[in-house]
Image (tube, rainbow, N blue to C red):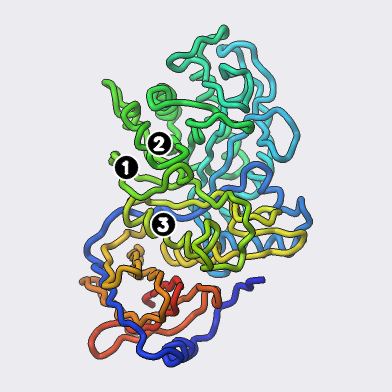
């Protein structure tokens, strides 16, 4: 089992260098003056009852509950995740695997007065409180479906459409405004409970018809809802960003854009963030929008249990696979945020970063990979241009608002590599010493010193098949 520790700087990197003859030297060049997209953060969801797992529903002790929360959200103790994606409930059942609606009864007509019932949102409300107490910056509340009585199929599961959007004809009429009111009531109930929702969404994977909470939509239909949602937020004077549309793949997200950009009152103008998932197609190109883009869900759903493997055979749950995914998303797709599907759950699966097994916390290599980004690349940072002289050594680099540079170097090669790190920019160092943190099959976040040579470059030696973060002090 992995244990979170801060190692005392040692000469392990020198030992690694001496254990192999003539390691390859790769030059990494960072231009700190050439800034790209802003970073909003890293995170995950605890929807569908997983938040209850965090609070001991499957046997986690009170002490380990607090430890787990620290590992997830505390910047100093743990990974410092800054985005939590909540599921807005639509079910009227008490099954913990469902997300319970705040509107449990059908009012009959869209114009009828609704009855709202506050609830803990299947553990997600107390989780949001605990996360904010540890440094959370963004709470994204997203609905997988509208309540059953608002939909064409009269079921919050099995797809169906929101009554009132294009190509729907429901006997009760249009429920668009009622659905908007429902979403904003969720936000208000959270605020009354002392929790701020910063971003709201109303769709999840609208291309799919699934046996769990789901609702379908195309871009034109989504635009109808966005306009009403945006106008209502403005009328009510709410400080709230709208996200859309959590498409099942990056190409699906691109295909929805024309519907959002069309017409005399383009719906895209009401949005703050455009979102997509990585399942059907990965985030490996920039979407055709001026908006910030977030990768809001992606995971290994094959069920393979690989908590301790950084690299074996490039499997979908391995740490190195996710290091590659994150780097491509930021470099090629210019995303501003990257969210795994689940943070922690009581299961032996790769769909989460952390496995909870009775009272045991098992940290996967995926968790350590995300930590090397989320801990050092804080909200408000900017990606800066970085390049590598080797085709099998990938690099991303970020400049935080306090001037600290975080450069992640992924050695996909099969041999130990010496890195010459050159950082260009007029912002200044302040200290000639830096640190590097190594995650591979052997190490979890292994801390090592890095020193600037007389040539003005930072020098470090990194193992084969490893992710290393170089951090200026």
**Camera-side residue: 18 or 58?**
18
Q: Say which residue label 2 marks.
A: 252
Q: In which image quadrant can residue 194 be found? A: top right
| Label 2 – label 3 distance at C-alpha | 27 Å
Residue at 48 percent of width and 15 percent of height: 164
**Camera-side residue: 189 or 161?**
161
**Camera-side residue: 45 or 304?**
304
Where residue 186 appears, x then y in whole percent?
58, 33
Residue at 55 percent of width and 22 percent of height: 160
Q: Is residue 235 visible?
A: no
Q: Are marks 1 and 3 in contact (CB under 8 Å)?
A: no
Q: Say which residue label 3 marks.
A: 379
Query: Does dot 2 land on a helix, a strand or a loop?
Result: helix
Q: Earlier in the sequence, mark 1 or mark 3?
A: 1
Q: Nearer the viewer, mark 1 or mark 3?
A: 1
Q: Is residue 62 visible?
A: yes
Disc 3 residue crowd, few under 14, some 14–19, many 20+, Cα 10 Å: many
Q: Earlier in the sequence, mark 2 or mark 3?
A: 2
Disc 2 residue crowd, few under 14, some 14–19, many 20+, Cα 10 Å: many
Q: Say which residue label 1 marks.
A: 287
Residue at 54 percent of width and 77 percent of height: 443
The quadrant of the picture occupied by the N terminus is bottom right
Where residue 408 appears, x then y in whole percent?
39, 68
Q: Are marks 2 and 3 in contact (CB under 8 Å)?
A: no
Q: In which image quadrant can residue 398 be found? A: bottom left
């Amino acid at each position: 089992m992995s244990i979170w520790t801060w190692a005392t700087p040692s000469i392990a990197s020198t030992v690694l260098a001496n254990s192999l003859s003539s390691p390859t030297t790769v030059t990494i060049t960072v231009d700190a003056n050439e800034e790209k997209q802003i970073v909003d953060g890293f995170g995950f969801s605890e929807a569908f009852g997983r938040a209850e797992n965090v609070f001991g529903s499957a046997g986690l002790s009170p002490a380990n509950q607090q430890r787990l929360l620290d590992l997830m959200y505390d910047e100093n103790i743990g990974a410092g995740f800054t985005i939590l994606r909540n599921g807005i409930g639509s079910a009227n059942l008490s099954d913990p695997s469902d997300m319970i609606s705040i509107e449990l009864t059908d009012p009959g007509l869209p114009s009828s007065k609704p009855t709202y019932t506050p609830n803990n949102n299947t553990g997600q409300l107390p989780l949001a409180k605990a996360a904010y107490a540890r440094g959370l910056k963004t709470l994204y509340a997203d609905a997988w479906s509208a309540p059953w009585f608002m939909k064409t199929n009269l079921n919050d599961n099995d797809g169906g459409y929101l009554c009132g959007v294009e190509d729907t004809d429901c006997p009760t009429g249009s429920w668009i405004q009622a659905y908007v009111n429902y979403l904003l009531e969720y936000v208000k109930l959270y605020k009354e409970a002392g929790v701020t929702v910063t971003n709201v969404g109303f769709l999840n994977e609208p291309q799919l018809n699934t046996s769990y909470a789901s609702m379908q939509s195309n871009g034109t239909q989504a635009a109808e809802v966005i306009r009403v949602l945006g106008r209502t937020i403005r009328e009510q004077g709410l400080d709230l960003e709208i996200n859309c549309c959590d498409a099942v793949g990056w190409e699906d997200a691109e295909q929805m854009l024309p519907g959002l950009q069309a017409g005399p009152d383009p719906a895209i103008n009401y949005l703050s963030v455009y979102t997509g998932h990585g399942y059907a197609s990965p985030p490996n190109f920039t979407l055709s929008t001026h908006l910030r883009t977030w990768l809001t869900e992606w995971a290994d759903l094959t069920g393979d249990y690989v908590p301790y493997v950084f690299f074996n055979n490039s499997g979908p749950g391995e740490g190195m696979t996710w290091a590659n995914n994150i780097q491509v998303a930021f470099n090629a797709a210019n995303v501003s945020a990257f969210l795994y599907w689940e943070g922690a759950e009581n299961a032996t699966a790769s769909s989460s970063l952390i496995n909870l097994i009775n009272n045991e916390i098992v940290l996967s290599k995926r968790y350590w990979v995300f930590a090397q980004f989320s801990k050092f690349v804080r909200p408000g940072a900017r990606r800066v241009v970085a390049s590598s002289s080797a085709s099998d050594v990938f690099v991303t680099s970020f400049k935080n608002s306090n001037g600290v540079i975080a450069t992640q170097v992924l050695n996909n090669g099969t041999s130990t590599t010496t890195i010459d790190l050159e950082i260009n920019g007029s912002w200044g160092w302040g200290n000639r010493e830096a640190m590097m943190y190594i995650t591979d099959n052997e190490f979890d976040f292994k801390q090592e010193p890095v020193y600037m040579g007389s040539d003005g470059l930072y020098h470090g030696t990194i193992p084969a098949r490893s992710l290393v973060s170089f951090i200026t002090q």
